[in-house]
Amino acid sequence: MKRIVAITLVVPDLATVLAVYQSFGYPLVSQGQLTQDDVIVQRDARFLSCAFACLTLNPGIEQHLELVEYPECQQQVPFSVSGWAALELLVADLNAVYEQVRSMGLPIWGEPKPLSFTDDIKAMQVLGRAGELIYFTQQISPVPAWPLPQVRQPYDQCFVAILCSHQIAVSNTFYARLFETPEPEILRSKVAGLS
């Protein structure tokens, strides 16, 4: 399986969102203004000259979080509009994460608890400053049916990215082609609440 190399979040206020991720210990790699070449990669001319910051989520695998400031973007209610995103980050100590995000005043959408299918993985959900949902996940013991990357730092890599799409089949085809991978099966599931 291919790994996530970079995640880009478009945010209304770069300084506010950057402070949150830096408080998690993610180091700043670069910061500046997007150029014409960056805009071509992002496929959106509106981002020309926008401020950006790039942080390393996991230096061992060179995984980055790219924050792009676009003041006109509005915070969205999770799961409500196409393009809304969530990240799932591995952590070493979920209880410590819980205390830190509480002290920061970040809204907790799901208290720390084991997943429905195993007590060996615990997770919680937090609403980030840009409206992104951040899933924090700790593996207590390995789960053979659900292997997770090894955690090497208190806040570690993103192992799942979630994107709200109005046409899942079209999005599935687009990302399979983009990442040069076979199209995964689309699984239908009713979202009744956060797990």
Image (cartoon, rainbow, N blue to C red):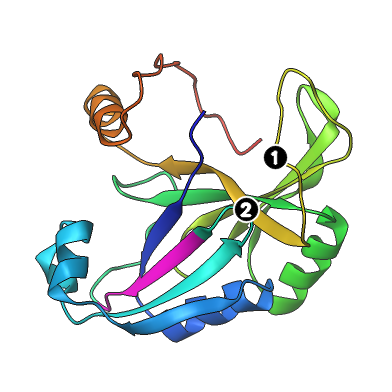
Q: CA distance from mark 2 to mark 1?
A: 8 Å
SS category of the residue bearing label 2 = strand
Q: Residue at x 10, y 67 (%)?
A: 45
User: Which secondary structure lies at badge 1?
Assistant: loop
Given contact means CB atoms under 8 Å apart, are the residues at marks 2 and 1 in contact? yes
Residue at image mark 1: 149
The boundaries of the magenta stretch are 64-71
Say which residue label 2 marks: 157
**Left or right of 54: which side holds 145?**
right
Which amino acid, by three-letter code, is at mark 2?
Gln
Looking at marks 2 and 1 on the same chain, the residue that comes earlier in the sequence is marked by 1
Give residue 31's quadrant in the image: bottom left
Above or below — where is 127 with respect to 15? above
Q: Main secondary structure of the magenta part?
A: strand
Answer whether residue 65 is magenta in the image: yes
Q: Taking 124 as reference, is 147 above or below it?
A: above
Q: Quadrant of residue 149?
A: top right
Quadrant showing the C terminus: top right
* x and y percentages locating residue 34 in the rendered image: 24, 77
Does any portion of residue 7 appear in the rendered image?
yes
Residue 57 or residue 162, whichever sits in front: 57
Residue at 33% x, 35% y is 179
Frontmost residue, 145 versus 83? 145
Question: What amino acid type should be assigned to the residue bearing mark 1?
Answer: Pro
Residue at figure coordinates x 22%, y 68% from the top left: 38
Figure disc tally:
2
